Image: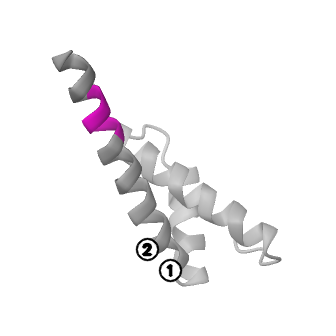
Amino acid sequence: MNARRILLAITACGTLLVAGCSSELAEMDDADLADRMHECRTVVDQSPGMAITCDNYQRECNARRKAGKFVC
């Protein structure tokens, strides 16, 4: 039962973190987002944290693409 509560807490924190990042990324300048995506594509050996960050950048690029802005 305790492990289940811990798992739920971790999941909730992860969800809040991603939600907070997505609103922050939505406000990021197009050129800055493009630069960061370029860096993500050129780094071969990414740390787990960088991989998550790059996934978030990719999601934001996809959202902008759907809105008609081809940034990345």
Q: Nearer the viewer, residue 40 or 69?
A: 69
Q: Is residue 27 above or below residue 18?
A: below
Amino acid type, residue under disc 1 in the picture: Met
Structural crowding at the residue carrying mark 2, measured as other residues with C-alpha within 10 Å and reported as few (<14), some (14–19) or many (≥20): few
- Secondary-structure class at tag 1: loop
Instruction: Name the residue: 40% across, 48% down.
Output: 15
Q: Nearer the viewer, residue 38 or 59?
A: 59
Instruction: Name the residue: 61% across, 56% down.
Output: 58
Q: Which residue is mark 2?
A: 24
Q: Is residue 70 left or right of residue 14?
A: right
Query: Can you name the residue that lies furthest to the front here?
Result: 1
Q: Quadrant of residue 49?
A: top left
Q: Which residue is mark 1?
A: 28
Instruction: Name the residue: 54% across, 49% down.
Output: 55
* CB under 8 Å between discs 1 and 2: yes
- Residue 42's disc is none
- Secondary-structure class at tag 2: helix
Q: Is residue 39 left or right of residue 69?
A: left
- Where is residue 40? Give x, y as percent: 52, 54
How is the protein colored in the picture?
A: one colour
| Spatial separation of the CA atoms under disc 1 and disc 2 | 7 Å
Start and end of the magenta stretch? Answer: 7-11
